[in-house]
Image (cartoon, rainbow, N blue to C red):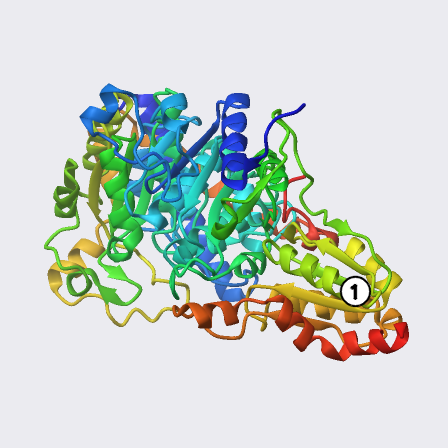
Amino acid sequence: MSRKPITFMQAINEGLTQAMEKDDRVFIMGEDVAGGAKVKHLADKNEDSWGGVFGVTKGLMPKFGRERVIDTPVSEMGYMGAAVGAAITGLRPVPELMFNDFVGFCLDTILAQGSKMRYMFGGKAKVPLTIRTTHGAGASGAAQHSGSYYGLFASIPGVKVVVPSNPYDAKGLLLAAIEEDNIVVFSEDKTLYGMKGDVPEGYYTVDIGKATITRAGTDLSIVTIGKMVQVAEAVADELAKSDIQVEVIDLRTVAPWDEATVIQSVQKTGRLIVIDEAHPRNSTATDIAAVVTDKAFDYLDGPVKRVTAPETPVPFASNLEQLYMPSVKRVLDEASEIIDDLKVVKA
Amino acid sequence: MKQLTPDLAKTAYKYMNDIRHFEDRVHKVFLTGAIPGFVHLYAGEEAVAVGVCSHLTDSDYITSTHRGHGHCIAKGCDVNGMMAEIYGKATGLNNGKGGSMHIADVDKGMLGANGMVSGGMPIAVGAGLRNKYLKTDDVAVCFFGDGANNEGNFHEAMNMASIWKLPVIFVNENNNFAEATPQIYATAAKTIAQRADAYDMPSERVDGKNFMAVFEAAGRAIDRARQGDGPTLIECRTYRNYGHFEGDQQTYKYDSPEEEAFAKRDDIQEFRAYAVSEGLLTAAEADQIEQQSTADIDAAVKFAEDSPLPDPESLYEDVFAD
């Protein structure tokens, strides 16, 4: 199967297309997922307008019609609640929350309704619902359009959370999410939309709950999420110059995260850095550090280091925003305690 | 439109009695401490739930509220399973893991009581969307209280149901109070029904203590919905016999003699008198139904009391579907 690499955005569009072709119950809803509803000159030509604010869902409405690609009013609480209602009555909605920062408008539908229904109804309901949303700084979106809140979703029992780092995973994890009979938050880093990679043309899934080791190493484990995989790889390249062999783990799923893979890696390397763009307190990175310290304490040769955003909102000014996100320099500085140890060992 | 046949009247009368007896028993048992948690009783509002649900089948959906026992019974949920659920027993409709505020029976189209005021409203819109998407003529009925009409959910749900012409019937149970706060204080509208005008939606305001008034208004709305003519808002003026929750001292009630007179009307006795006078039910049949209802609720209490607690292992089960 050979073809030119496609972008992260095209991979998601392709995944949605194939999910909708496979199962008539799958539909998309959200603000401007097609755009231009009831505009006659568009309808006459069977055209959509925006196809999502980033263009991710462009072309789906002409292919599947407005019954399956539903533009909603600006009513996140209403349409996300409707998605929960459609899911428990047998459809498989894929609503889009344009920016994860908007979750405050619709949190009840996830926190108090959808995530709890199966449990509080005694196992007698299924909620097959995939919520697509976007996160991430680096696009000058400022404080209300740049946050990374996958950890907030992940803190709710009954919700699975997926954060793809590349086009292949984006398509495969999305198709796996849509196959799930549970709520899955599929969180896309908006700054990765242009990233290119090889993606199979056909239908395939990537297992939810399984991390992947993108680079094997024996000296230091780096666990990372989403676009921070690129930072981890660059750190690994840098440390290789000092003969330090880094194992990079792309978590792929934030909830439930893959304890087995992370702990096995730490058992091998004895050192762990977690790189995460989300906030450090009460967060995924802190959870990983706590679990590893609890379950693999005897294997650790130093403290688990977390390199994350600071505990602040996302700033607008570009220099501050760059500083906000973990970078190679920040990782080398903030984890120097264990990196320096390693350099001594290796010297 | 569905007419009130003798058979339907008997079923309705049975359900109304079941609700009243169920709630009166829960009220008494709660005082003994045998029922844990928060309980909100529906007694006094029977004509609304039964008047609406008399038009529905198992393939129609309803969403409910924290005051949900009446909706469950009117939609045909098993009273043994309901009572056991309220006791927190393994034989409960939700295996004891939901309780009073979360009783559900999805197979019967009962999508859950709901501990969040207005929480069921967009869910009903979703069920209505599902019905339209699958080209069925099933409807979704959204029961909600007067408190919910000031939540954002109300406005978003009403607007979406209207723009998409969904088969959703919004049934407002205006019992005058959101907890202890009167509707006349909290709502900047003379009636809740008039809020439908803002969403280009037909509405009716009916005497919720009058079974036939509710039954006929619901019939008109449900017919329109089944025919693809979209949603309706029905405001049913009613009153709860008990407090917001069990333990409420209800110091806010009866601000006027009119309010007290309305509160003390008995919707069940009024329906009995109507049904007997119309020949839908004989007095002997009505007596027999009342006795059967008492016996059924006695049996439900016994079933709940005799049932085992949930297995400790079930704490961890059913967070996710496999």
| Residue B85 shown left or right of residue A95 in the figure | right
> Within the image, what quadrant is residue A171 found in?
top right
Q: Is mark 1 on a helix, strand or loop?
A: loop
At a point 15% along the width and 47% down the height, the residue shown is: B195
Residue shown at 65% from the left, 55% from the top? A229
Q: Which of B125 and B175 is in front in this view?
A: B125
Chain of the residue on which disc 1 is drawn: A
Visible residue check, residue B262? yes
Relative placement, left or right, of B89 versus A79 is right
Residue nearest the observer in this picture, B79 or A343: A343
For the point 40% across and 26% down, the residue is B57
Q: Residue furthest front?
A: A241
Residue A341 vertical placement versus B222 (above, below): below
Quarter the C terminus of chain B occupies: top right
Q: Name the residue under label 1.
A: A241
Of residues A33 and B34, the one drawn nearer to the viewer in this rendering: A33
Residue B48, position in %: x, y?
Answer: 28, 41
Q: Where is residue B32 in the image (x, y as percent from the top left)?
A: 53, 65
Image coordinates for residue A186, horizontal then vertical, percent:
54, 46
- Dot 1 surroundings within 10 Å: few (below 14), some, or many (20 or more)? few
Residue at x 88% of width, y 69% of height: A299
**Image quadrant where residue A244 sits:** bottom right
Identify the image quadrant of the N terminus of chain B. Answer: top left
Give A119 or B234, whichever is nearer the viewer: A119
Is residue B63 among the parts visible in the rendering? no
Q: In this view, does B104 lie above or below B230?
A: below
Residue type at numbered disc 1 = Lys
Q: Residue B126, relative to residue B55: is it above or below?
A: below
Q: In which quarter of the image is residue A82?
A: top left
Q: Where is residue B172 in the image (x, y as percent from the top left)?
A: 25, 46
Above or below, A179 relative to B3:
below
